[in-house]
């Protein structure tokens, strides 16, 4: 029985009726371009075959009943009276519903069952997947006629305004717009995008999960965003045309900003500008099927994230150091917001199991905990599995 069938069966058992709609919403990886999205830069994410399934039906009243089968938890509420929940996960659902209210769409109560195989806390954006799935499902059930761009913006706004994480748009965009066998080169300012074929040949994508969990809402993510804004404000005094770090270049950072701000702010801005350049070079390498060059850019990206942006941690750094010692790994870096979660590695298929064993053994010897390994393939974005189309 598939994950989708299991969630639908759970729904039928709980609510004594089949769901009107079942939605699949994938997690995402990001190949390169980290912390650039909220600076209006470029990112290169892809949807993956780890996903959340949502079974959903309309109610005849304004009540809400959500069940998270993986947590063994439920939430009951009422439209128009949505407050933050101590359980946290309902906030991602309620935040999206609140966006529909703010846009004056009339929707009714909902029964929802949620489950999936996106590892929590691994930096694979289970929250964005859930937000996109709810937005997609509500749009379908109530026949609101919104396009995917609008749904992505609402999902992002839910996390910004209701949950309180000032995330950029990358996670939601990747979960909604993913395409099997492709990464998405996304311009986070214009939202123009193109699909970049990711032909890994003899390679495979491997995620190594430190099992160190992080909560971005509480701290450092928002701090980094504010630091980048401080850098932009300083640059604008000399270069009024700079609206975000997307508009800055290396010369501005090295010859102007360095003398205007503390070293910490300079380092943050230097990383973002260099990461945008790395991504452009990396995409050109992928178009040439040059995995070796792309891998080098991944390693450079991690160095910047660790030393300049300071969002890594000893566990992530150690996994990347181990990757450098493996001849069959073309590139590796930390992925996601930081302070835990996964590294993403591009590994030759023939040796991937041996690589996992060596890295896991070394990591456990160092930190006393065995990392989790996930092989993943690229997937299509959020879609209806059954029910309304």
Image (cartoon, rainbow, N blue to C red):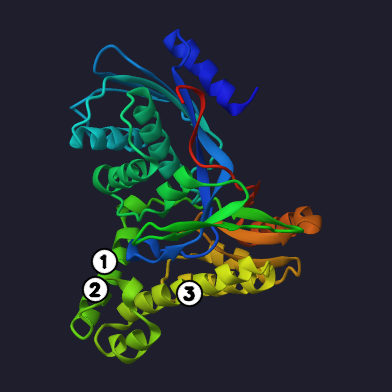
The CA span between labels 2 and 3 is 19 Å
Would you place residue 114 above or below residue 223 in this image?
above
Q: Pick out the residue farthest to the right.
A: 350
Seen from the viewer's position, the closer of residues 182 and 294 is: 182
Q: Are marks 2 and 3 in contact (CB under 8 Å)?
A: no
Q: Pick out the residue farthest to the top.
A: 16
Q: Quadrant of residue 354?
A: bottom right
- Residue that appears at 27% across and 90% down: 259
Residue bearing mark 3? 304
Residue bearing mark 2? 230
The CA span between labels 1 and 2 is 6 Å
> How many other residues sit within 10 Å of disc 1, few (<14), some (14-19) or many (≥20)?
some
Mark linked to residue 51: none
Residue 67 locus on image (x, y percent): 41, 23
The CA span between labels 3 and 1 is 18 Å
Q: Left of 156 or right of it: where is 284? A: right
Q: Are marks 1 and 2 in contact (CB under 8 Å)?
A: yes
Label 2 vs 3, first from the N-terminus: 2
Residue 347 locus on image (x, y percent): 71, 60
Q: Quarter holding the N terminus?
A: top right
Instruction: Give the SS element for disc 1.
Output: helix
Answer whether residue 106 is visible to the viewer in this image: yes
């Amino acid at each position: 029985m598939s994950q989708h069938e299991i969630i639908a069966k759970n729904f039928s058992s709980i609510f004594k009726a089949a769901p009107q709609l079942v939605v699949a919403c994938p997690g995402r990886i990001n190949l390169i371009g980290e912390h650039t999205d909220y600076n209006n830069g470029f990112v290169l994410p892809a949807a993956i075959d780890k996903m959340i399934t949502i079974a959903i039906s309309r109610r005849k009243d304004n009540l809400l009943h959500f069940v998270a089968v993986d947590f063994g938890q439920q939430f009951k509420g009422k439209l128009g009276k949505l407050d933050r929940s101590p359980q946290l996960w309902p906030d991602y659902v309620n935040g999206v519903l609140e966006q529909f209210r703010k846009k004056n769409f009339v929707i009714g109560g909902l029964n929802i069952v949620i489950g999936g195989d996106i590892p929590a806390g691994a930096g694979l954006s289970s929250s964005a997947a859930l937000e996109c799935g709810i937005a997609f499902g509500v749009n379908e059930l109530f026949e609101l006629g919104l396009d995917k761009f609008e749904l992505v913006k609402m999902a992002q706004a839910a996390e910004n305004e209701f949950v309180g994480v000032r995330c950029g748009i990358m996670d939601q965009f990747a979960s909604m717009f993913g395409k099997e066998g492709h990464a998405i080169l996304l311009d986070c300012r214009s939202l123009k995008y193109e699909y970049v074929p990711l032909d890994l040949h003899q390679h495979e994508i491997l995620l190594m999960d430190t099992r160190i969990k992080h909560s971005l809402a509480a701290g450092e993510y928002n701090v980094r965003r504010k630091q980048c804004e401080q850098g932009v404000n300083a640059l604008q005094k000399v270069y009024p045309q700079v609206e975000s770090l997307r508009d800055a270049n290396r010369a501005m950072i090295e010859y102007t900003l360095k003398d205007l701000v503390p070293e910490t702010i300079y380092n943050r801005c230097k990383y973002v500008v260099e990461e945008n350049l790395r991504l452009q070079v990396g995409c050109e390498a992928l178009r040439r099927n040059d995995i070796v060059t792309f891998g080098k850019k991944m390693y450079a990206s991690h160095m910047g994230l660790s030393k300049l942006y300071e969002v890594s941690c000893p566990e992530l750094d150690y996994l990347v150091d181990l990757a450098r010692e493996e001849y069959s790994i073309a590139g590796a870096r930390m992925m996601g917001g930081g302070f835990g979660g996964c590294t993403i590695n591009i590994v030759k298929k023939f040796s991937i199991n041996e690589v996992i064993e060596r890295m896991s053994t070394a990591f456990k010897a160092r930190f006393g905990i065995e990392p989790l390994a996930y092989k993943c393939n690229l997937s299509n974005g959020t879609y209806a599995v059954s029910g309304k189309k």
